Image: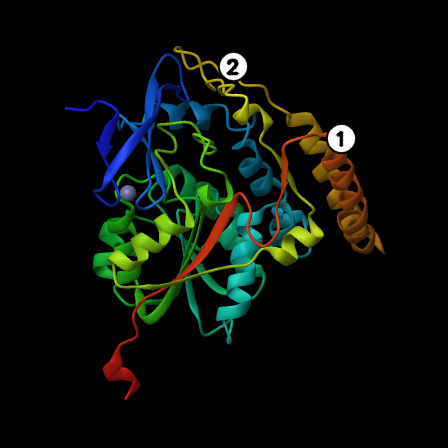
Amino acid sequence: MNINVATCLLCGDTAELRYGEYPGYQEPATYKIYHCRHCNTAFSLPRADASSIYENIYNNADRVPGYNRYLRYARFVKKFAEPLKYLADSAEAYWGVKEALSQLVIDNKAARILEIGSGLGYFTFALVKAGYNAKGIDISETAVSQAKESFGNYYICNGIAEYATNNAELYDIVIFTEVIEHVDDPQNFLALALTLLKPGGQAIITTPNKSFFTDDITWASDLPPVHSWWFSEESVKYIAKSINADIKFVSFSKYYKKNYKVVGLKSQRDGRLPCPYFNKDGRLIARTARSKNTLKVHLQVLLSRIPFGTMFTDFFKKYLKMLFGKLRVLIEKDTIVCKDRGILLCAIIQKPPDKKGHL
Ligand SMILES: [Zn+2]
C-alpha cells in the first residue's frame, strides 16, 4: 500500500499526498492534505468532528480573524440605507450573489428565495430589504432565535435534509455562501438543495477558489477541520455534472475593477505554514484586528448618512484603492491581481427543467 496516495473523496480517482502534518485550526491536531489531479480538488484527512472548534469560534466570535466580520455585518447591516449594497461592497461572496440574482430574477416579489445556512441572519435580511422574497434556514436554534430578534420573522430552524423532504420544489432560488467546504458530502448536500428547487430553478453557491492559485499552493482555505475541502472550478463542475445539473460561473471583473484586490502568495510559496487559531485548551492564539475594522465600519456608516457620503466612498473605492493596490504590486513581489475570477468562486447551478412543463 502506497501511503503517499489516497482515494479522492470527491471523484474516487487517485489523490496525492501534498503535505503530511499540516496545522489544524486547533492545536495539537495536524492533517494530511491531498490533491486530486483528476477533479482538481484538495481535501484533508483524517475527517474530524469540528463541533468543539465551532463552539470556540462562537465563544470568541468578535475576535476570530475571518469570522469576526460576520458579527460585524450582523451588528451594522441595519444601519445602512441599502444593506445589500453594503454587504456586496464588503465581501466578494455577497457581491457575487447580488450579481447572480440581478441576472436571474425578473420579478423580485414572485421569485421565492431560500438562504441555506443563514447563520446570524444579516444576508437574508439584506435580500428582504432589497425587495426579494427571501427566507433563511439554519440548523442552529441560537442563530435562528438571534436572527429573528434582530431582523424579523424571516427564518426557519431546521436541518436541510428534513426540510427538503417536506418542502420539495417550493423555491425558485437557493443560496449558500461558503457552506459546501464545511460539509462531509457536498454531492449529497447539493442534491438536497436541488430538491427544494422547482424544475429549472437555480442554486447560487460560493466557496474559496482553488483554480485561482497555482498548483504549488497546498491549501489557501480555512484550516482543517473547519474547512475539510478546497474546491476548484473543476471540482464544482464535477459535483454539478454528477447530479445532472448545468453550471456557470459569475464573472467578478466589475467587482475587482471597483475593489482593486491583490493577493499576496509569498508566504505560501516560501513554504511557511499557517498558525493554528486555538491552543489545545480552546484559548484564541491568532492575532485579531478588531478595533481597526470596527472603526472603518463606523466611518462607512457615517459617510452613508451624510449628503455626498456615498459619492465619497465610491470615489475612495474606485480611485484610492486602485492607486494603493497598484503601489503594492510595484513594491511587493509575487503578488497576483484578481481579474474576472478571484480567491472566491460564485457558481450558478441549474436544476434540469421539467420537459413536460415546457411543452
Ligand atoms: Zn478527485
The residue depicted at 81 percent of the width and 56 percent of the height is: 311
Residue most extreme to the right: 307
Residue at mark 2: C-beta within 8 A of ligand 1: no
Q: N-terminal of the two: label 1 or label 2? A: 2
Name the residue carrying label 1: 331
Instruction: Tell me if mark 1 has few (under 14), some (14-19) or many (20+) residues whose alpha carbon lies within 10 angstroms of its own.
Output: few
The residue depicted at 39 percent of the width and 46 percent of the height is: 117
- Pick the front one: 137 or 251: 251
Residue 325 lies, with reference to residue 239, above or below; the image says above
Quarter of the rendered structure image containing ligand 1? top left
Identify the element where label 1 is drawn: helix
For the question of whether residue 162 can be seen, the reply is yes
Q: In the picture, which quadrant includes the N terminus?
A: top left
The residue depicted at 53 percent of the width and 26 percent of the height is: 268
Residue 142 lies, with reference to residue 53, above or below; the image says below
Tell me if 342 is positioned left or right of 44 in this view.
Answer: right
Q: Which residue type carries mark 2?
A: Ile
- Pick the front one: 191 or 273: 273
Instruction: Tell me if mark 2 has few (under 14), some (14-19) or many (20+) residues whose alpha carbon lies within 10 angstroms of its own.
Output: some
Name the residue carrying label 2: 285
Q: Nearer the viewer, mark 1 or mark 2?
A: 1
Q: Which residue type carries mark 1?
A: Ile
| Residue 19 rendering spot, x and y as whole percentages | 36, 23
